[in-house]
Amino acid sequence: MSNTVFCPVTNGQIDGTTCLDIVLVADREAKPSILPEGVKWSEEQRQKCLTCKYHADIEEV
């Protein structure tokens, strides 16, 4: 069973792989097209990710 964390971008629990994908997009290292279906990307969503407590600590997810 994988660990999940609360994600302010999806407004729900996500696994570490999904978290990493969102972080990569927020850091502009990947395109929003890698995001899971249903995740709407915007500058507001990017800011939510950048200020999330898990953003800097991705290894612990």
Image (tube, rainbow, N blue to C red):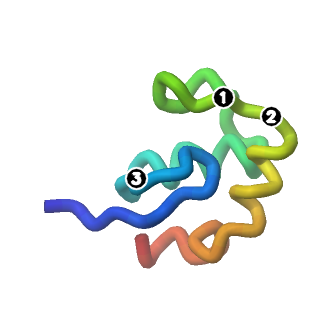
Given the image, on which type of amino acid does mark 3 rest?
Ile
Quadrant of the rendering where the C terminus is positioned: bottom left
Q: Residue at x 57, y 76 (%)?
A: 57
Earlier sequence position, callout 2 versus callout 3? 3
Q: Residue at x 13, y 61 (%)?
A: 1
Q: Is residue 1 above or below residue 36?
A: below
User: Which SS class for mark 2?
Assistant: loop
Q: Which mark is residue 42?
A: 2
Identify residue for label 3: 14
In the image shown, does 13 or 33 lie closer to the viewer? 13
Q: Position of residue 42 (x, y in %)?
A: 80, 34
User: Which SS class for mark 3?
Assistant: strand
Earlier sequence position, callout 3 versus callout 1? 3
Q: Residue at x 86, y 41 (%)?
A: 43
Mark 2 to mark 3: distance in Å?
19 Å
Is 11 situated left or right of 30 in this image? Answer: left
CB under 8 Å between callouts 3 and 1? Answer: no
Given the image, on which type of amino acid does mark 1 rest?
Lys
Q: Position of residue 44 (x, y in %)?
A: 83, 45
Identify residue for label 1: 40
Crowdedness near tag 3: few (<14), some (14–19) or many (≥20) residues, C-alpha within 10 Å: some
CB under 8 Å between callouts 2 and 1? Answer: yes
